[in-house]
Image (cartoon, grey):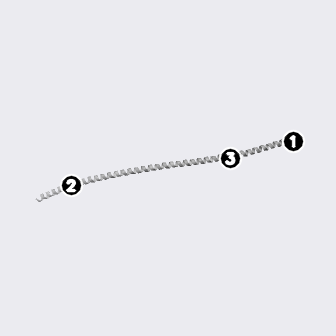
Amino acid sequence: EKELQTTMESMQKHTDSRIEDVKKAFQAEKVFMEKKFNETREGIQKDAAKRVTGLENELQSTKACMQKEADDRVADVEKELQTTMESMQKHTDSRIEDVKKAFQAEKVFMEKKFNETREGIQKDAAKRVTGLENELQSTKACMQK
């Protein structure tokens, strides 16, 4: 019984020692795995941060490019509009000059016609006055007799 008791105690100590060894091994493995996990996580975070930074830079570059394209297009449209407005203004000015010339020509023509008509009326009136004066003289002469 003593021998059995001693053997059992010895086996128990050995088992307890093995259990402690396994616990220590598991603890060491746990620490190692946590360290590896943290390193991996940090690596992933660094890679993700680099990727995010890269994407942000790419986005900024794309935005800047799009803004430049939009600004260039606006500038082109503004130039085109300015050119069109200047062309329309020149055309309008030219038409105004044409109308002024046409009105001036019409005015000269109307003044000439008016003067011709007035001269004709004056000649007719002068003839009529001369005729009336002659008739009056003739009538006076007739009345004198």
Task: Measuring from the top left, give residue 92's x and y in whole percent.
Answer: 38, 51
Q: Which residue is drawn at 66% across and 46% down?
A: 43
Residue depth check, mark 1 versus mark 3: number of the one nearer the observer: 3
SS of the residue under disc 2: helix
User: In this image, 50 relative to 101: left or right?
Assistant: right
| Element marked by disc 1 | helix
Left or right: residue 8 versus residue 120 is right
Q: Position of residue 143 (x, y in %)?
A: 12, 58
Q: Which of labels 1 and 2 is toward the front? A: 1
Q: Is residue 60 left or right of residue 132?
A: right
Tag in front: 3 or 2: 3
Q: Residue 6 carries which label?
A: 1
Quarter of the picture holding the C terminus: bottom left
Question: Residue at (12%, 58%) from the top-left corner?
Answer: 141
* Dot placed on the residue nearer the N-terminal end, 3 or 2: 3
- Residue occupied by mark 2: 123
Q: Is mark 3 on a helix, strand or loop?
A: helix
Q: In this view, does 79 lie to the left or right of 34?
A: left
Q: Which amino acid does label 2 sit on?
A: Lys
Q: How far apart are marks 1 and 2 (CA)?
A: 169 Å
According to the picture, the residue beneath numbered tag 3 turns out to be 39
Q: Tell me which numbered mark, 1 or 2, is placed earlier along the sequence.
A: 1
Residue 130 drawn at (x, y percent) = 18, 56
Name the quadrant of the N terminus. Answer: top right
- Three-letter residue code for mark 1: Thr
In the figure, 6 relative to 143: above or below? above
Is there a contact, CB below 8 Å, between mark 3 and mark 2? no
Q: Give the Cα distance between marks 3 and 2.
A: 123 Å
Query: 10 Å neighbourhood of mark 1: few (<14), some, or many (≥20)?
Result: few
